[in-house]
Image: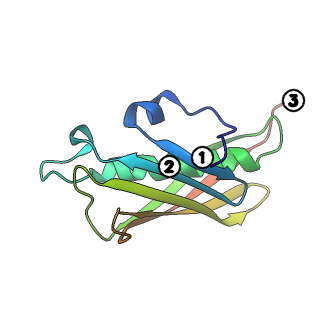
Amino acid sequence: MSNPPVKQPPFARLVGINITHVSPERITAELPVRDELTNGRGILHGGAIMALADNLGGHATVVNLKPGFATTTIESKTNFFAALSAGDTAHAECTPLHRGRTTMVWQTRITRNDGRLAAVVTQTQLVIEPKG
């Protein structure tokens, strides 16, 4: 495991996202499925899955930015395949599909403890040049 070079935002800490690996090519994380993150049926809320992926895509972009540059998410799409129940863990792996001068596109695959694919999130990050 490598140490995250980017400090996690307060929201990521609140949700309970644990970054387990960071490199320009791949970021991995885990999110324990607590009752507070579930929907009315006791499964991980779709918004929590999307928040996990959004945090990783933003983090991955920051790792790949030149000094002084910033980023923001401009598009995100999620496909849900299998539920994650309370007590399970969402395992996320974020890898680049495109790393360009003005945008970066990341894919985050989220699996359950049993290895089954739970969701795939594809997001586009805008690369913001410093002013001045």
Residue 101 location, quadrant: bottom right
Where is residue 35 drawn, in percent x and y?
21, 41
Label 2 sits on what residue type? Asp
Residue with the mark numbered 2: 54
| Colour mapping | rainbow
User: What residue is at 66 percent from the left and 36 percent from the top?
Assistant: 6
Label 1 sits on what residue type? Gly
- The reply to whether residue 126 is visible in this rendering is no
Which residue occupies the extreme front position in the image?
A: 1
Q: Earlier in the sequence, mark 1 or mark 3?
A: 1
Label 3 sits on what residue type? Gly
Q: Is residue 77 above or below residue 47?
A: below
Q: Nearer the viewer, mark 1 or mark 3?
A: 1
Q: Earlier in the sequence, mark 2 or mark 3?
A: 2
Residue with the mark numbered 3: 132
Where is residue 80 drawn, in percent x and y?
33, 67
- CA distance separating discs 2 and 1: 6 Å
Mark 2, other Cα within 10 Å: few <14 / some 14–19 / many ≥20: many
Q: Is residue 54 left or right of residue 95?
A: left
User: What residue is at 51 percent from the left and 50 percent from the top?
Assistant: 29
Residue 91 location, quadrant: bottom left
Q: Quadrant of the C terminus?
A: top right
Q: Is residue 40 above or below residue 77?
A: above
Residue with the mark numbered 1: 58
Q: Is residue 117 left or right of residue 100?
A: left
Q: Secondary structure at mark 3?
A: loop
Camera-nearest residue between 3 and 41: 3
Mark 1, other Cα within 10 Å: few <14 / some 14–19 / many ≥20: many
